Image (cartoon, helix red, strand yellow):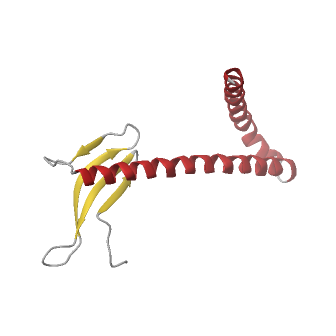
Amino acid sequence: MTTELPKYYFRVRENGAAVFKIDTENRQRRIEMDQIAVINIRNGEVKPQGQRTLSDADQAEITRWMADRKSLLAQRDIDDIHRAVDYLNLTTHWAQSKASEEQLEDVTDRLLLAMHDLRTVLVRKKADRLNKG
């Protein structure tokens, strides 16, 4: 652990985080975490805990964390899509060279429906982009 602790800790949870202020300035020199807010990353809502009023520094750190978190989640989303393309290619290779008749029977209909759904959405979105451009 580093000697210098951050002033804030964000406990990530679905759709946001619980925000804690870190305090080591006490007699026992223990790390104390005081929850100051709950944030919702999707709608940008920040709810102070209890009767607390967030300071400008608290609000600035929460705003910074939310921007960083949104950026990280966006990067993860696109990375997942690039992986999906790889999985589709691997699945094609598997179906062509390794799959048994029983395995193909088990997955063919579900794969075809999922690919049809994806193709429909991608074609519609591409047409929308072309019409705008």
Q: Quadrant of the N terminus?
A: bottom left
Please name whichever residue, 3 or 18, is drawn nearer the observer in this view of the structure. 3
Look at the picture and state if 57 lies above or below 104. Answer: below
Q: Residue at x 37, y 77 (%)?
A: 2
Q: Residue at x 37, y 47 (%)?
A: 16
Look at the picture and state if 97 lies above or below 122. Answer: below
Q: Quadrant of the C terminus?
A: top right
Q: Position of residue 108 (x, y in %)?
A: 76, 38
Look at the picture and state if 46 lies above or below 36. Answer: above
Q: Residue at x 28, y 64 (%)?
A: 7
Please name whichever residue, 25 or 30, is drawn nearer the observer in this view of the structure. 25
Q: Position of residue 91 (x, y in %)?
A: 77, 48
- Left or right position of 129 against 44: right
Q: Position of residue 118 (x, y in %)?
A: 68, 33
Look at the picture and state if 10 lies above or below 41. Answer: below
Residue 13 visible at all? no
Q: Residue furthest front?
A: 56
Q: Residue at x 72, y 50 (%)?
A: 87
Residue 58 visible at all? yes
Q: Residue furthest right?
A: 97
Q: Position of residue 76 (x, y in %)?
A: 56, 51
